[in-house]
């Protein structure tokens, strides 16, 4: 999709703060510091609209980005390690769960995994939880430019096996440092919503 107009439309901690115009939504989830905000910036041709940080746990709200008034990208707080108090972190779980289970506009969830490492227990738990709730998922293996071709092939096979990837679940290798995966991910997203 040709992306020129994108805006941060809402920063929400409660459902009443969510946008209400029923645009289709694609959510992005993953463990803290896996690169969700960087990937969103790459997909929408921006350098810093989605806030990035080297410190895990930068995203602490649900952030809604309006893309060309055709759909929304939704950046969710990372799970796992984050530099936040236990009290604050404990609020994220119910907030994320409610969004993922109750939001009618949600069409698919993009799950980011670091291609250099095996999936964490949290990654597998999240994926199985989404499968249990019959949510459509797209697996994205990030940071592929950090691996040579043999390492990437080996790690990709290992990831698919560890996740018990289903035939209908897309798997997209991705790098924010080049265009690897960008077009493929847009094509997968378009398969879940009606955009041109």
Image: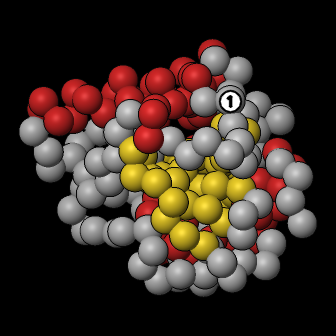
> Where 88 sits versus 62, above or below?
above
Among the 4 quarters of the image, the one containing residue 101: top right
Residue extending farthest to the top is 132
Asked which secondary structure carries label 1, the reply is loop
Q: Is residue 2 left or right of residue 134?
A: right
Looking at the image, which residue is at 17% across and 36% down? 88
Write the residue at 61% across / 81% down: 45
Q: Is residue 77 left or right of residue 115?
A: left
Q: Quadrant of residue 175?
A: bottom right
Residue 84 can be seen in this image: yes
Classify mark 1: residues with Cα within 10 Å, few (<14), some (14-19) or many (20+). few
Tell me the residue that label 1 is attached to. 104
Q: Write down the quadrant of residue 149 in the picture.
A: bottom right
Q: Choose between 8 and 113: the one closer to the eye.
A: 8
Q: Position of residue 134 (x, y in %)?
A: 70, 21
Q: Which residue is drawn at the image coordinates 29% and 38% (left, top)?
A: 80
Quadrant holding the C terminus: bottom right
Relative to the observer, which residue lies in front, 125 or 109? 109
């Amino acid at each position: 999709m040709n992306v020129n107009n994108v805006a941060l439309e809402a920063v929400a901690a409660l459902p009443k703060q969510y946008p209400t115009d029923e645009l289709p939504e694609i959510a992005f989830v993953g463990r803290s510091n896996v690169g969700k905000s960087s990937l969103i910036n790459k997909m929408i041709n921006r350098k810093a609209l989605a806030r990035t940080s080297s410190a895990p746990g930068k995203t602490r709200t649900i952030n809604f980005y309006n893309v060309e008034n055709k759909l929304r990208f939704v950046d969710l707080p990372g799970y796992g390690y984050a530099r936040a108090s236990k009290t604050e972190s404990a609020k994220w779980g119910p907030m994320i769960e409610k969004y993922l289970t109750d939001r009618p506009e949600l069409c698919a969830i993009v799950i980011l995994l670091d291609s250099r490492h095996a999936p964490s227990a949290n990654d597998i738990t999240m994926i199985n939880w989404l499968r249990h709730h019959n949510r459509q998922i797209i697996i994205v293996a990030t940071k592929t430019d950090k691996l040579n071709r043999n390492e990437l092939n080996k790690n990709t096979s290992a990831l698919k096996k560890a996740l018990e990837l289903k035939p209908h679940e897309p798997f997209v290798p991705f790098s924010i440092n080049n265009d690897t995966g960008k077009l493929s991910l847009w094509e997968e997203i378009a398969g879940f919503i009606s955009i041109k």
